[in-house]
Amino acid sequence: MDLVVEGRAWYKGKLQHVCIGIENGRIARVKKVLKGERQLDFNDRIILPGAIDVHTHMREPGMTRKEDFSTGSVAAAFGGVTCFFDMPNTKPQSIHRDDVMEKKELASKKSWVDFGLFGGVSDASNPQRIADQVVGFKIFMSSTTGSVLLSEDKDIRRAMDLIKPTKKVVSVHAEDEHLLIKREEASIRDHAEARPRRAEASAIERLAQFSQQNKVNICHVTSLEGLEALSKGAFTSEATPHHMLLDIASCGRKGFCKVNPPLRPKSDKEALLAAFASGKISLLASDHAPHTVEEKEQEFDSAPSGVPGVETSFPLMMALARKERIGLGVLIKAACETPAQLFGLNKGAIEEGKDADLMVLDPRIVTSIVPRNLHSKCGWTPFEGQEAIFPQAVFLRGQLLVEEGGLVGERNGRDVVAKRRVAA
Ligand code: DOR
Ligand code: ZN
């Protein structure tokens, strides 16, 4: 055994004091007592599987003033995220094979944690040409930052039919473009009115027809109407920490909390958190969408939409788990297990044979989020002052990557799609 990590691990659905034996980057054995060449004893601290963030915008190529694969993946690592999926609305978009391959090379060189790329879809592209290189496909049903729109049912059908034989997940930004109100906006409240909850519900209802033939995943559900619409099809769904913890009243600073879909009134926020806590939401996803302070400080109407979150996502939810607002099992399911199962990764659980992606936390150490302690290039967070429990150690495939607030180890992030191909 190369390494044995000992502590209170999430094993077989509960916290148990065990030794996790690691060999060649994988969990080789889990037992009460194990001896390894190296032994790390975390005593009564908690060991969890690394989180998988299925929705991030790392901005490379083309927008690296906001973020890049290096800074974004370091932020991920410090937040316990050992694998992220990147969205295709970069410059160029990840729609055509050359562009996907180029992005893949950049991420392979620069990422500190494992990653997967989403492919974009346009009304004229053939997603089958990139299917072997992407972890899933992303469809934007409404206009948002740099996206390629597929707002009409006939275009969505064409895309879904082409994707069907690839069996890939289709993650959808579900806001009905036809129900958005285009007018000048001066506040978060205006923004929420311009992108009403009905638009979310309508988009989800329109997607129900595809949910038998495709694996349709509804990104960032925000509202009670949206939650109700989920029952109309066989969907998986995502919730973000910003929609569960922030609302239109909690964000005063200019366009900093402008995001698509928008923050909602408190009642929706609470309904969403309750749905998450009851296990009705499949996935915790940050929708990490950094923009620079200068961009966000513009007049509200011209400020771009999106908030950073990959580093704070799991720690915020962990703080809620400590207060028993959500169950630890529910959180681990949504942040680790279900993402791995849905996208077919050999990760997301402390089990023999899985990648040894682990985070170690001390639930007694609750901190208040401070922007300067975070690692995204954008340098700000909408969660300033909120309680969080950050991991003290993070392992990527058995390699220690984060230890006591510092980055250790080597840059060794791998594409999860390419890795699976080699293993097959
Ligand atoms: O607010 C958003 N920002 N929503 C999106 O769908 C895209 C994202 C971005 O890329 O900035
Ligand atoms: Zn997004």
Image (cartoon, rainbow, N blue to C red):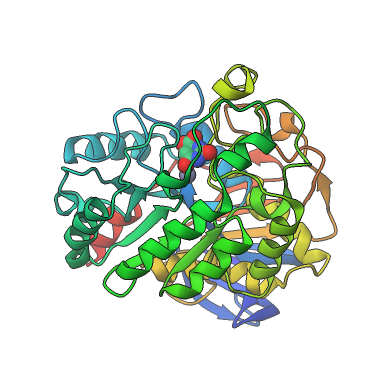
Please state which of residues 43 and 372 is positioned toward the viewer in this rendering. 372
Q: Residue at x 40, y 69 (%)?
A: 342
Q: Based on the displayed image, in which of its 4 quarters is residue 123 positioned? A: top left
Vertically, is 182 above or below 155? above
Taking the image as shown, residue 306 lies to the left or right of residue 327, namely left
Residue 408 in view (yes/no):
no
* Residue occupying the point 32% across, 55% down: 135
Q: Is residue 202 left or right of residue 273?
A: left
Q: Return the x and y of residue 417 as percentages of the image width and height.
A: 30, 56
Say how many tags the image has: 0
Q: Nearer the viewer, residue 287 or 209?
A: 209
User: Residue 134, image x and y in percent?
Assistant: 28, 52
Residue 84 lies, with reference to residue 14, above or below; the image says: above
The answer to whether residue 186 of the structure is visible from this angle is yes
- Of residue 211 and residue 181, the one placed in the foreground of this image is 181
Q: Is residue 211 above or below residue 74?
A: below
Question: Residue at point 85% right, 59% down?
Answer: 364
Quadrant that contains the C terminus: bottom left
Query: Residue visible at 30% across and 40% down?
Result: 104
**On the rendered structure, is 64 left or right of 367?**
left
Front-lying residue, 48 or 144: 144
Q: Position of residue 40 (x, y in %)?
A: 66, 61
In the image, residue 348 lies at what x, y percent?
Answer: 50, 67
Name the quadrant containing residue 144: top left
